[in-house]
Image (cartoon, grey):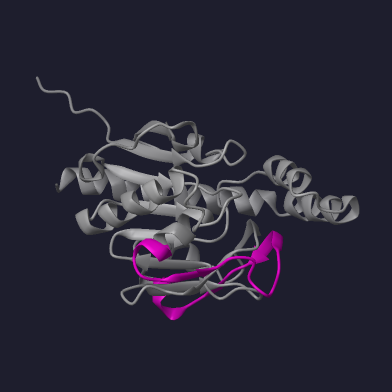
Amino acid sequence: MTVSLPPVLTVVQLDDEVPLDRFAEWLDGVTLRLVRADQGEDIGPVDAVDGLIVLGGNMSAHDDQLPQIPAARTALTEAVAAGVPTLGICLGAQLLAVATGGRVHVDAPPGREAGTVALRWRPEAQSDPLLGALAADPTVVMPTMHSDAVVDLPRTGTWLASSPMYPYQAFRVGNAWGVQFHPEASPELLRRWAVADQLPADEADAMVTAAREADERVARDGRTLAEAFAARVRDHVRHR
């Protein structure tokens, strides 16, 4: 009897301070393969992977002196071309945008977006195969921490969500999704980022308090997104 193994979902970590966090326990029915690109590990042939997640980081999408940045852009270009289910989170979303013809502004004029933000769904999100389940709820909030931002979507991109501060909170290019927010991040991880970014103590405390108050909803919706993405990976493998 042939036993089918679960799909392998490749997770690319670009920065020691930005891990997979709670997504690790929410990605059902797949085996996780962590690639520490920040430590020189290579992704390998992208068209052979079952699914791909590219995480965030403190660097920019144009920091080409760091080898993991151009390598990640190349991997995302190849993943989109091959139809590999792909999710870029924060910097990963910015890299996806640049890799497919969009534009990212480093230190964008609106300034740092930090804490929990309300998502505003575009009409296209209602039928989106990944975010559609979340888009049915107009009150979704998600953690965020960034000052760079996507300012032009790729020509083939579909705009899915915005926030009051930044327009491009979620988009899709083919079988790849970029989310500027952090659906994986716990309040404890937000606290670590606030300390690393040297936010004023009162600002950091208020941000973390708000994140804790919203965390039941955030964790529920983050799990929904993770499970939906894992299902996309499993479906891709079944039909490959």
Where residue 138 sits: x, y (%)?
Answer: 57, 72
Where residue 169 sits: x, y (%)?
Answer: 53, 67
Residue nearest the observer in this picture, 218 or 152: 152
Q: Is residue 229 left or right of residue 21?
A: left
- Is residue 49 part of the magenta span, yes or no? no
- Residue 44, visible in the rendered structure: yes
- Is residue 99 part of the magenta span, yes or no? yes
Q: Considering the image in quadrants, where does the N terminus appear? A: top left
Q: Quadrant of residue 163?
A: bottom right
- Residue 130, visible in the rendered structure: no
Image mark count: 0
6 lies above or below 138? above
Residue nearest the observer in this picture, 200 or 51: 200
Residue nearest the observer in this picture, 174 or 79: 79
Where residue 155 sits: x, y (%)?
Answer: 33, 77
- The residue most toward the top is 1
Q: What residue appears at the point 49 percent right and 45 percent down from the top-left corner? A: 66
Q: Is residue 9 left or right of residue 3?
A: right
Q: What residue appears at the point 76 percent right and 48 percent down from the top-left corner? A: 194
172 lies above or below 87? below
Where residue 23 sits: x, y (%)?
Answer: 51, 41
Q: Quadrant of residue 148?
A: bottom right
Magenta span covers which residues?
97-126
206 lies above or below 5? below
Q: Is residue 8 left or right of residue 191?
A: left
- The residue most toward the left is 1
Q: What residue appears at the point 23 percent right and 40 percent down from the top-left corner? A: 45
Q: What residue appears at the point 21 percent right and 45 percent down from the top-left corner? A: 47
Q: Is residue 235 left or right of residue 116?
A: left
